[in-house]
Image (cartoon, rainbow, N blue to C red):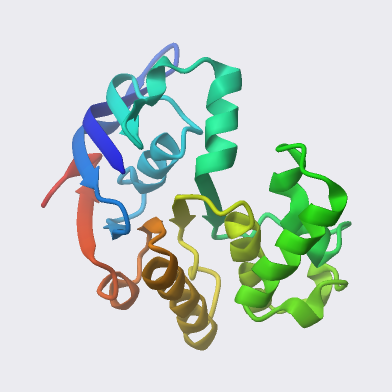
Amino acid sequence: MIQLNNISKVYKTKTIETLALDNINLSVEKGEFLSIMGPSGCGKSTLLNIIGLLDEPSSGMINISDQAILEYKSKALAKFRNQKLGFIFQSFHLINDLSVIDNVELPLIYRNIGSSERKKLAEEALESVGLKNRMKHFPSQLSGGQKQRVAIARAIVGKPEIILADEPTGNLDSVMGGEVMDILLKLNKENSTTIVMVTHDKLMAEKTHKLIRLFDGSQVN
């Protein structure tokens, strides 16, 4: 499902170069749940952003669903990202002025899906994370765990093949974090959704199929 070959990332300024990733080789099979661990600043989020096509590597090749992604032009890349990938972030990134259901519908607007179909799909996604009764609420009326559930519903509403999660339990207490992790595990098991998750939590990582560790931009196992 995901294949990275010799991926490196260098950030350059006028006076300094910073090597964020160094020769990363990674293979993720369809239906696999992969965790990425490592200390702060080791390149975890950079790697996730490259897999998610939010950033470009300085060198190397990326294949997702047997397609050479780096050959895509920007418009085709945006379409591929919208249809194939779902994103979950540590800080939720919900729009406070929109209701819960409107937040969940957002990715579908860019697919030119009609409003009635968008609403139906958003309701189904919210039901799957146990929040159908909160559709008309606003993010300010929700707990941290509920906000992350909304973020998961938004990530899955378009039925992506791959979910990329950056510290999805990082802002939650252990109980809420466990509930969010259970939802991800259920998605992986029942829908065969491929998931790549960055985490600092060893207990969460141990629940996944595979774990890789980064240190100073390099793979250490």
**The residue positioned farthest toward the bottom in the image shown:** 175
Viewer can see residue 33: yes
Left or right of residue 84, residue 143 in this image:
right
Which residue is at a point 88% across and 57% down the rendered structure image? 97
Dividing the picture into quarters, in which one does residue 111 lie?
Answer: top right
Eyeballing the image, is 179 above or below 34?
Answer: below
Q: Report the residue at 50% width, 42% height from top.
A: 84
**12 to 215, vertically: above or below:** above
Instruction: Name the one closer to the observer, 184 or 202.
Output: 184
Name which residue lies at 81% across and 60% down. 119
Residue 7: % across, % down:
25, 29
Q: Where is residue 13 in the image (x, y as percent from the top left)?
A: 44, 17
As rendered, which of 75 and 166 lies closer to the eye? Answer: 75
**Relative side of 132 to 44, left or right:** right
Is residue 147 in sight in this rendering? no
| Image position, residue 127 (x, y; %) | 68, 76
